[in-house]
Image (cartoon, rainbow, N blue to C red):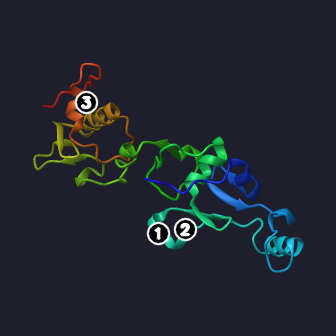
Amino acid sequence: MAYLPLPPAETIRQLVDYNPETGIFIWKPRTAEHMAHGRYGPKSNALNWNNRYAGKRADSSKGGFHKYRYIHLRGKVYKAHRIAWAYHYGWEPIGQIDHINGDKSDNRIANIRDVSPSLNSRNVGRKVIGKSGILCVTQTAKGRWAVVVSRTRIGTYDDLATAIVARDAAWKALGVTEQHGRVGIEFRRKAAAPDNQVTLPAPH
C-alpha cells in the first residue's frame, strides 16, 4: 500500500505537539514565517490562526471514517498514527502502523508499531466467541473448552484456564497479540517446523 509521504519530522514538530502518553496532538502557535500565504499578510495571518487554533486538538476523526484519526498539515491530510510515529522516532514508518489493542483511534506510542502488511492484516479486532467471552475459545455442548484459531482446531480441554494457555501458545508461535483473531491455517505448518516447536497442553 502506497502512503502519502510525510513531512520531515522537524516540520511536524514545529507545527504540532504530540503527547506519547495520550496519543493526542495539539496545535502549536504559528509564527509569521509559517503564514506567508494568506489574505492579510504574515503577521495578521499568524495572529488570526493562533486565536482560532493554537492550543486546541489537532487530530480529528474525519467523520468517524474507520475510527482513524487524521491531521491536516500544509494542505494535505495524513493519518495521525503515522504522524505520531514520525514525530516520536524521527523517521517515517517503513511498513504499516498496527494498533496493538485494536483501537484505531488510540495513537499512544506504546500502542502503535511498524509492521509488515501481512502481520497487520491479522489484527482484525477482538471477537467474542461462544459463552467463554474469550477470543478463540468456545464451550462445547458437553461443557468442555475448545480452542480454534482461524478454523484450525488446536484442542479441547476440561477447564478454561488450560484452554487459554493452549490458545496463548498458539498465538505466541506466530508472534501475534490477543487482538489478532485470524491467524490462518499456517499455524500447523509453523508449529510443526523443527526450529519452531510449540508446546501445547495435551487435549483430553
Residue type indicated by callout 1? Phe
Q: Which residue is mark 3?
A: 190
Q: Quick one: label 3, few (<14), some, or many (20+) residues within 10 Å?
A: some
| Residue at image location 82% in from the left, 74% down from the top | 51
Element type at marker 1?
helix
Q: Label 1, label 2: how many angstroms apart (C-alpha)? A: 7 Å
Q: Is residue 87 above or below residue 50?
A: above
Q: In this figure, which residue is indicated by the disc labeled 1?
A: 65
Q: Quadrant of residue 61?
A: bottom right
Observer-nearest of 195 and 160: 195
Residue 156 lies, in percent from the top left, at 16, 38
Q: Position of residue 151 (x, y in %)?
A: 18, 46
| Residue on which the image places disc 2 | 61
Instruction: Give the residue at x 33% y 34%.
Output: 174
Q: Amino acid at mark 2?
A: Ser
User: Which secondary structure lies at badge 2?
Assistant: loop
Q: Bin the neighbour count of mark 2 within 10 Å (Cα to Cα): few under 14, some 14-19, many 20 and up.
A: some
- In contact (CB < 8 Å): disc 1 and disc 2: yes
Closer-to-camera residue (23/51): 51
Residue 143 pos. (x, y %): 15, 46
Q: Is residue 49 left or right of residue 22?
A: right
Question: Between 164 and 194, which is closer to the camera in this rendering?
Answer: 194
Looking at this view, is 54 or 201 the one in front?
54
Residue furthest to the bottom: 39
Residue 82: which disc?
A: none
Residue 25 screen position, x and y as percent: 67, 58
Quadrant housing the C terminus: top left
